Amino acid sequence: MVAGTGVAALLERGAELREAAEVLSAAGSGAGGGLLIEGPAGIGKSALIRAIRREAEGEGFAVLAARGAELEREFSFGVVRQLFEPALAARKRAERDALLAGAAHLAEPAIGELAPPDAADVSPSVDPSFAVLHGLYWLTANLAEHSPLLIAVDDAHWSDAASLRFLSYLAGRLEGLPVVLTVALRPFELGAASKLVAALDAEATTRVVHLPPLSAAGTDALVRARFQTEPAPGFATACHRASGGNPQLTQELLAALAAEGVEPTPAGAAHIADLRADRIAASVLARVGHLGDPAVALARSVAVLGRTVSVAEVSGGGSGASSNGSSSNSTNNNTATTTTTTTLTPPRVPGPTMALLGSRLRASRRGVIRLRLGCPAETPGGCSGTAGLQKGAAPRAFRAAAGATTTAKLKLTRSTRRRLSRRHRIRVTVAVTAHDGQGNEATSSGAYTVLSPRR
């Protein structure tokens, strides 16, 4: 959305909206499915969720919506209550009783009735918590009998554990229900939500959407909408460079420019790099702080040394780097998303260790995936690692000398090729170790999206 301008356009998200429309259309015909929306903070997941909700309502879906909150993660079934309490409260007593009839009444402890299920209603061999999940499933099914149902959960990485268990339980039981489960989250802060991602990812009916940053043209559109005038050449480019195409960062940058009276002129473009965006700074510092003191020290080093600094220089100069530290980095483009976690070690070993070369991964028609990776020149002992799938392809080991490239080739099984042709995407994981030749190592892991050959 172009906030504060009256422009209600969702920029550069047409492909994602089309994917959502396909999932909704299938559910409207009784073939339920999931939609997993991934991306870093500020990339536009919430805006996309809102657009999908409007689309669903226009198609006659009932919408149950909830949002995880960092300070409410200890509130058991908090997200579940957000989803179901409004739907039940809006109905008359007789309608509520009908929705909670049969096995669905086992859901009552999760939606407001604090009493646990009656022992007579639960088999002695069944965990009472499982009975609640079973009841919530049947409550979902009963609601879906009246109209197709969209369950939309934003910021799922902050959901409470009990609600995540239900969403994971539901994810594997959508087939045959006119229900769409849409979940938006940050893939770099999963925590307990990792099981939900795995459950959704395992289903052939799930579509996975990785939101890329805005292009330079998209940032230019935001600049024009904000200032309501033609920006000087280079001004929008400077904004794009400063924000990296992140919609929220761009909006905060433009708001800060407006607050300081900076106009979209050549002089204004020169001012952008020195601008302070306090609201964004506070948010970023909070996120980095959650990663621990070594990550804060690393961020400070980068802030002082500038964006052109190498990882080797940071790991050598950061006062907080240690063998126990960790940092996160994400690279987004139109077709592949990488999540890298690097263990900081003595400064002779740089990290992250290897870079995926090329803008996209695509399986061949014979079911072969080729990952071309490069080992940093400043890694004296070279790089080694493995690439594979959780299931569906044997892992492949690889090795590359310092400054060299290598190719890891995966051959998909027949069943995985069929799954890829139905879902259009699967994930490959890569684990890499960099060696300094003196016994010190740095490890990294990445998750890459692979596209079907026909897309």
Image: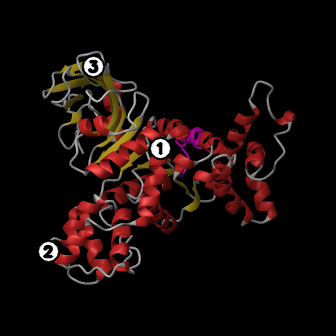
Query: Mark 3 or 2, which is nearer the eye?
Result: 2
Quarter of the image with the C terminus is: top left
| Residue type at numbered disc 2 | Pro
Q: Position of residue 387 (x, y in %)?
A: 29, 25
Which residue is depicted at the point 25% across and 27% down?
348
> Is 94 left, or right, of 212 in this rendering?
right
Question: Circle 1 — which element?
Answer: loop
Q: Position of residue 376 (x, y in %)?
A: 18, 31
Question: Circle 2 — which element?
Answer: loop
The quadrant in which residue 284 appears is bottom left
Q: Which residue lies under the disc numbered 1?
A: 189
| Viewer-proximal residue among 304 and 154 | 304
Residue 251: numbered disc: none
Q: Are marks 2 and 1 in contact (CB under 8 Å)?
A: no
Which residue is depicted at the point 33% across and 61% down?
13
Q: Which residue lies under the disc numbered 3?
A: 396
Q: Are marks 3 and 2 in contact (CB under 8 Å)?
A: no
Q: Which residues are magenta?
A: 167-180
| Residue type at numbered disc 3 | Arg
Q: Position of residue 271 (x, y in %)?
A: 24, 71
Q: Position of residue 17 (x, y in %)?
A: 37, 60
The quadrant in which residue 375 appears is top left
Q: Earlier in the sequence, mark 2 or mark 1?
A: 1
Residue 421 visible in the picture: no
Q: Determine whether 41 is above or below 345 in the image.
A: below
Residue 418 visible in the picture: yes
